C-alpha cells in the first residue's frame, strides 16, 4: 500500500475462548507502521491494544487464542503464518518488545549481563567475550552508570527506572527494526517516566527504529508519537497524525477521551466531561458501533451497523455515522483543541 | 505570620504538627517514612498530597486516620488529640474520619455482599436500629453514588473497576464522616471512568461539606480537584500552596521538576515546553541525604545544601516552602 511501511496489519481478528464463551478481543484491526515513526495505539483497558501488539510476536497463550483472520506483513512475510521456529528467529532480533512491568520481564535469578548476552549469542552468534562487551555498550547507551559493575548484578539490585532501562537495553540488543513498547512507563514515577520517554525518543532518532507505543496515557502520546490509532472494543475507531487526533478529532469516543482528562490549565469550577457507562462486554459485542450505548450523539443506525471509515486527510480517518451526509451536524464539546 | 501551613482563616479541621512515622526495617535500621510534616487542613477544603512512590504520602494519610500510631508529633482533629483518644471518644473519631483506597479489588471483602460491606460501619457504630432501616440506608447510599438498589445483593467481583470505586465511596460515606482520606482513588481506573469518580467526589463534597485529603501521584488530577496542594519528598513536605499558585509559581526545585516531568495531553505544548529531566533515582528513605533531601538530584544544588537543614517557611501568604539555600 504505502511504500514506506515497514509493517502492514490488515483486518486482524483475535478471539479467546474462556469458560464463559468466546471473547472477541480484536475485531478487524488495520494499520500501517512507517519506517522511523512512532505509532501510538491508545485505548482503555480491554480495548484490544495489547492483544494486537502481542499477536504480532505471537506472545498470546496458544491454548485459548484463535487468530480468526487477517494478516501482518513484515518484509513480505505474514507474521501470523510463521512457524514457531521462524518466529523465534525474528522475536527479539528484528522485532523486540518492552513490557510494562520491568520486574516481571527480567529473570530474578539471572545476572543482568547474562540476560542481555543471551539474545546476542542466540541471534547474532557473538562469542562470549564480544557479547559481554556489547552488553556493556548497551547499558551505556541506555544511560546506566558503571555498566562494567552493573552487568554482574541481579535485577533486585536495580531501581524501577533502571530496570526498565535494562529491559530496553535487552530489546535493543540486536538492533531491531521494530520496537513494540507496551505501557513502558506506566509503572514508573513521573520524574523517572520523563527519563525513559526522553531515552526512547533519543534512541529512536539515533537508531532509526519504528516504534509501536501502546498506552492509555494521552500525555505520553502527545509527548512521543507521530501518528495515533485510537482503539475501542477491539476496533480502530479513529487514526491520524498526532495533531489531527488532538486538535481535530472526528469521533465522539475520541472527543470523550480528550474531554475527560483534566489539563493543567483546566478551569476547576467546571466539571470534567466523563464518558457515561462502561465499555461493552466482549463476549457479545454490539452489532453496530460499539460506542453507541455511551455516545451522546447516537442515532438509530449506530446500533444497527458498524460505520465505514470517512477520510479527512491523507492520514486521518474515523469510523462514525455522524459523517454520513444525512447525519445531523454535531459540534464536539468545547474543550477539544488543546490549551490554546 | 500565620499558623504553619494554613491560609490563615482559622477554620482548621485538622492540625498536623511535626508528624513523624518511622518503621523499623531491620536491626538498628529505621525507615523514616514521614519525618516531620506540619500543616493544617481546613473544613470543607480538598488538600492534595503529591509525590513519587516512597515519599511517605500514603503513610501520612494512614497516620491521620489512626491506621498507624505516629512516632512523633501530633494530630489534632476538631480540638482533640487523635492518637491520644481511646474508647468511646476514639470510636467517635473513627466514624468522623474515613478512607477510600486505590485498589478496591483488595479493599472490598470478596466474600461479603455489597449491602454488608456498606453497612459494616453502620453496624459497628450502632447507627441503625432495624434491618429495614439498615437496608434503606444502604439503598440510599447506592443511589447517592450512582449505583442501582439491586446492586446491594451482589458481590464485589460482579462490578467493574469504576463501580467498585463507587462502592468504596458509599462505604466511606455510610457513617457520615467529616473527613475523608482518599488514597489514589482514581489511579487504577481508565480515564473516562476517572472523570466519573472525580465528578462524584466533588459533588459529594459540596452536598455534605466534606473535607478531603486527596493523595495521588497524578499531578493533573490533583491540581484539578484540590484547593491547596502539598508536595512531599522523602518523608517531608517541600512545598505547600494554593493549587493555582503552586502550579503557576512553584519555588522548590523539586516541585518545578515534578511539574515539568508531567506529560501534558497537548502536542503543541509538549513540543514547546522546556523540560527539566531529573537525573538519578530517589535516595533510600532509610538513609536520606543530610540537609536538603533533594540536593542529590537537584539541578541547582549548592554546597551549603548539605549542611543546612532547610527551614519550613511561609514565603508569601499561604505559600509555604522548605527554604533550601539553592533558591533563597
Image: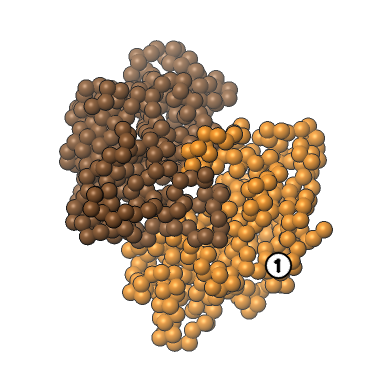
Q: Which quadrant does the N terminus of chain A fall into?
A: top left
Residue located beneath label 1 in the image: B12
Give x and y (percent) for residue A239: 33, 39
Task: Give the residue drawn at x 46%, y 46%.
Answer: A337
Vertical comparison of B26 with A195: above or below: below
Q: Residue B116: tell me if it is visible.
A: no
Q: Is residue B68 left or right of residue A49?
A: right
Vertical comparison of A315 with A116: above or below: below
Task: Give the residue drawn at x 28%, y 27%.
Answer: A7
- In the rendered image, which quarter is residue B151 located in? bottom left
Q: Residue A122: tell me if it is visible.
A: yes
Task: Give the residue drawn at x 65%, y 69%.
Answer: B43
Task: Give the residue drawn at x 74%, y 47%.
Answer: B322
| Of A318 and B126, the residue lying toward us | A318
- In the rendered image, which quarter is residue B21 located in? bottom right
Q: Is residue B47 left or right of residue B100?
A: right
Chain of the residue displaying label 1: B
Give x and y (percent) for residue B150: 33, 74
Q: Which chain is orange?
A: B
Q: Is residue A26 left or right of residue B265?
A: left
Give x and y (percent) for residue A52: 29, 39
Q: Which chain is brown?
A: A
Amino acid at each position: 500500500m504505502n511504500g514506506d511501511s515497514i509493517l502492514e496489519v490488515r483486518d486482524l481478528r483475535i478471539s479467546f475462548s474462556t469458560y464463559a464463551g468466546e471473547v472477541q478481543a480484536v475485531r478487524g484491526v488495520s494499520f500501517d507502521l512507517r519506517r522511523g515513526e512512532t505509532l501510538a495505539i491508545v485505548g482503555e483497558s480491554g480495548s484490544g491494544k495489547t492483544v494486537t501488539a502481542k499477536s504480532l510476536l505471537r506472545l498470546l497463550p496458544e491454548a485459548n487464542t484463535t487468530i480468526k483472520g487477517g494478516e501482518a506483513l513484515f518484509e513480505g512475510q505474514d507474521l501470523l503464518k510463521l512457524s514457531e521456529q521462524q518466529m523465534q528467529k525474528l522475536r527479539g532480533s528484528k522485532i523486540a518488545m518492552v513490557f510494562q512491568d520491568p520486574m516481571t520481564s527480567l529473570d530474578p535469578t539471572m545476572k543482568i549481563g547474562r540476560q542481555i548476552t543471551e539474545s546476542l549469542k542466540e541471534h547474532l552468534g557473538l562469542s562470549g567475550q564480544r557479547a559481554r562487551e556489547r552488553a556493556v555498550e548497551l547499558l551505556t547507551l541506555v544511560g546506566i552508570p558503571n555498566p562494567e559493575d552493573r552487568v554482574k548484578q541481579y535485577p533486585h539490585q536495580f531501581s524501577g527506572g533502571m530496570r526498565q532501562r535494562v529491559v530496553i537495553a535487552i530489546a535493543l540488543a540486536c538492533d531491531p527494526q521494530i520496537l513494540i513498547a507496551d505501557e513502558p512507563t506506566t509503572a514508573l514515577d513521573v520524574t523517572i517516566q520523563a527519563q525513559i520517554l526522553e531515552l526512547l525518543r533519543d534512541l529512536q532518532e539515533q537508531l532509526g527504529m519504528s516504534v509501536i507505543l501502546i498506552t492509555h496515557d494521552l500525555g505520553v502520546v502527545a509527548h512521543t508519537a507521530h501518528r495515533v490509532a485510537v482503539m475501542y472494543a477491539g476496533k480502530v475507531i479513529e487514526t491520524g497524525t498526532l495533531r489531527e487526533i488532538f486538535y481535530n478529532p472526528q469521533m465522539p469516543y475520541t472527543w470523550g477521551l480528550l474531554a475527560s482528562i483534566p489539563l493543567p490549565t483546566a478551569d476547576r469550577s467546571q466539571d470534567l466531561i466523563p464518558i457515561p457507562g462502561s465499555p461493552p462486554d466482549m463476549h457479545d459485542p454490539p452489532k453496530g458501533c460499539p460506542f453507541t450505548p455511551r455516545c451522546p450523539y447516537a442515532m438509530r443506525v449506530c446500533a444497527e451497523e458498524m460505520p465505514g471509515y470517512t477520510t479527512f486527510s491523507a492520514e486521518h480517518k474515523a469510523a462514525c455515522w455522524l459523517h454520513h451526509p444525512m447525519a445531523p451536524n454535531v459540534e464536539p464539546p468545547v474543550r477539544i483543541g488543546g490549551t490554546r | 505570620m500565620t499558623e504553619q501551613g494554613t491560609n490563615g482563616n482559622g477554620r482548621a479541621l485538622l492540625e498536623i504538627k511535626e508528624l513523624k512515622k518511622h518503621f523499623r526495617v531491620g536491626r538498628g535500621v529505621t525507615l523514616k517514612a514521614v519525618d516531620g510534616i506540619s500543616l493544617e487542613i481546613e473544613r470543607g477544603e480538598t488538600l492534595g498530597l503529591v509525590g513519587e512512590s516512597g515519599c511517605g504520602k500514603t503513610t501520612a494519610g494512614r497516620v491521620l486516620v489512626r491506621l498507624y500510631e505516629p512516632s512523633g508529633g501530633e494530630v489534632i482533629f476538631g480540638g482533640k488529640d487523635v492518637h491520644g483518644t481511646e474508647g468511646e471518644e476514639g470510636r467517635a473519631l473513627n466514624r468522623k474520619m474515613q478512607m477510600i483506597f486505590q485498589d478496591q479489588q483488595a479493599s472490598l471483602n470478596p466474600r461479603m455482599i455489597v449491602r454488608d460491606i456498606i453497612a459494616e460501619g453502620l453496624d459497628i457504630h450502632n447507627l441503625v436500629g432495624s434491618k429495614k432501616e439498615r437496608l434503606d440506608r444502604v439503598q440510599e447510599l447506592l443511589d447517592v453514588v450512582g449505583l442501582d438498589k439491586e446492586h446491594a445483593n451482589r458481590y464485589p467481583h460482579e462490578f467493574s473497576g469504576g463501580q467498585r470505586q463507587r462502592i468504596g465511596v458509599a462505604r466511606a460515606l455510610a457513617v457520615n464522616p467529616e473527613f475523608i482520606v482518599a488514597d489514589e482513588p482514581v489511579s487504577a481506573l481508565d480515564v473516562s471512568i476517572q472523570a466519573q469518580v472525580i465528578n462524584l467526589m466533588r459533588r459529594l463534597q459540596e452536598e455534605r461539606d466534606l473535607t478531603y485529603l486527596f493523595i495521588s501521584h497524578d499531578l493533573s488530577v490533583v491540581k484539578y480537584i484540590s484547593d491547596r496542594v502539598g508536595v512531599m519528598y522523602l518523608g517531608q513536605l517541600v512545598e505547600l500552596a494554593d493549587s493555582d499558585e503552586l502550579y503557576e509559581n512553584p519555588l522548590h526545585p523539586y516541585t518545578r521538576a515534578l511539574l515539568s516531568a508531567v506529560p501534558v495531553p497537548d502536542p503543541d505544548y509538549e513540543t514547546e515546553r522546556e523540560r527539566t529531566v531529573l537525573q538519578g533515582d530517589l535516595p533510600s528513605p532509610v538513609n536520606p541525604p543530610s540537609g536538603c533531601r533533594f540536593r542529590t538530584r537537584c539541578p541547582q544544588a549548592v554546597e551549603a545544601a548539605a549542611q543546612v537543614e532547610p527551614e519550613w517557611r511561609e514565603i508569601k501568604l499561604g505559600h509555604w516552602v522548605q527554604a533550601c539555600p539553592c533558591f533563597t
